[in-house]
Amino acid sequence: MMPVIVIVSILFTIAIMLIVAERFLISYGDCAITLNNERNISVKGGDSLLSYLTSNKIFIPSACGGKGTCGFCKVKVSKGGGTLLPTEEIYVTRQERAEGVRMACQVKIRSSIEINIPESLLGASEMKARVGKIEKLTHDIKYVRFDLLDSERISFKPGQYIQIKIPGAGEYRAYSIASEPSKDSCVELTVRLVPGGLCSTYVHEVMEEGDSVDLTGPFGDFCLQEDSDREIVGIAGGCGMAPIRSIVHHMAERGMPRKMSYFFGARTTKDLFYTKELKDIESKHPNFKYIPALSEPRPHEKWEGEVGLITHVVDRYVKSTKNMEAYLCGPPPMIDAAIALLTKKGMDPERIYFDKF
């Protein structure tokens, strides 16, 4: 009997040969990609939808660079595109399948296709930048400022994110923008070191001031609802600070016309950052209140602020959610607990905006 490893090797070789044969020997001719029923892109068939979009300066999220392992590059395919592939099944929900959602990196263009991409993604672009400043904020979080080159400018909404292209890896990682939109010639981020994280390790251990970096964006539907006048409850933890900081600075520039309470959760004082900055904003704007809380304060820290899980602190402060909306950013357990608390207090789920890290 032939060993299993030999069979697997043969099948792998056959698969590679089929891919090469399709790429170089089969011609699908001229194909059209119709975008949002208004734009036609002419291409030579044979490559992935994601590749064609990128080559035509249409940038959608794709952390893995088109390897089919992140599930971010979702688009709606209304015509063409073939059937859903096994590689997509883990990322595309049942409801999304019914709506025609596909992963752009897995859709091979063999004939004309019609797709729909949210307008919020069509403003994204590729930007050349240089690392202008790196600063240590905590034991595991760094501040990075990217200065855009060639007089480029970025237009984004407070709360949105950009992607960093990791040099030599061909992959991207997403980070929320920590700066306000008025700073349109640079992008500020706060990056937490994740053990084994490809991009965070690069930022913390390799990146230096003066390095050149490629960015894409902005992306994301999580952003300040500027047409609203409702009072804001902000809840964040860890690097969830970034988008809320962007919102706070943006509103501070405009004199804080709306009331806002910002609750930030950390374990100990070594996990707190931007406290003085936010307290300074609080001192200048009566409509703004910053409430940091520690879940595991150490006795030697002599912490005199709020103690407990951040959702417990919110529960003590927020008695009524009438005419309020919430912005939540942080780890999934915190987000889920905050949503449960706010809805229990009567907040309309449609007024709860969140971004899980």
Image (spheres, rainbow, N blue to C red):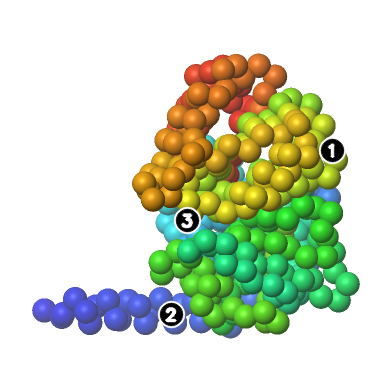
Q: Residue at x 53, y 73 (%)?
A: 204
Q: Residue at x 55, y 41 (%)?
A: 292
Image height check: is 164 above or below 150? above
Q: Secondary structure at mark 2?
A: helix
Location of residue 146 (image quadrant): bottom right
Q: Position of residue 247 (x, y in %)?
A: 72, 44
Give the amino acid at mark 3: Lys
Label 2 near label 1: C-beta < 8 Å?
Answer: no
Q: Position of residue 241 (x, y in %)?
A: 60, 49
Q: Nearer the viewer, residue 40 or 170?
A: 170
Per the image, the residue denoted by label 1 is 255
Give the amino acid at mark 1: Gly
Label 3 near label 1: C-beta < 8 Å?
Answer: no
Q: CA distance from mark 1 to mark 3?
A: 31 Å
Please state if 306 lies on the left or on the right of 215 as rendered: left
Per the image, the residue denoted by label 3 is 270
Q: CA distance from mark 3 to mark 2?
A: 51 Å
Location of residue 11 (image quadrant): bottom left
Q: Compare marks 1 and 2 and give the one earlier in the sequence.
A: 2
Q: Residue at x 75, y 31 (%)?
A: 287
Q: Position of residue 196 (x, y in %)?
A: 41, 69
Per the image, the residue denoted by label 2 is 16
Q: Nearer the viewer, residue 273 or 140?
A: 273
The crowd level at tag 2 (other Cα within 10 Å; few <14, some 14-19, many 20+) is: few
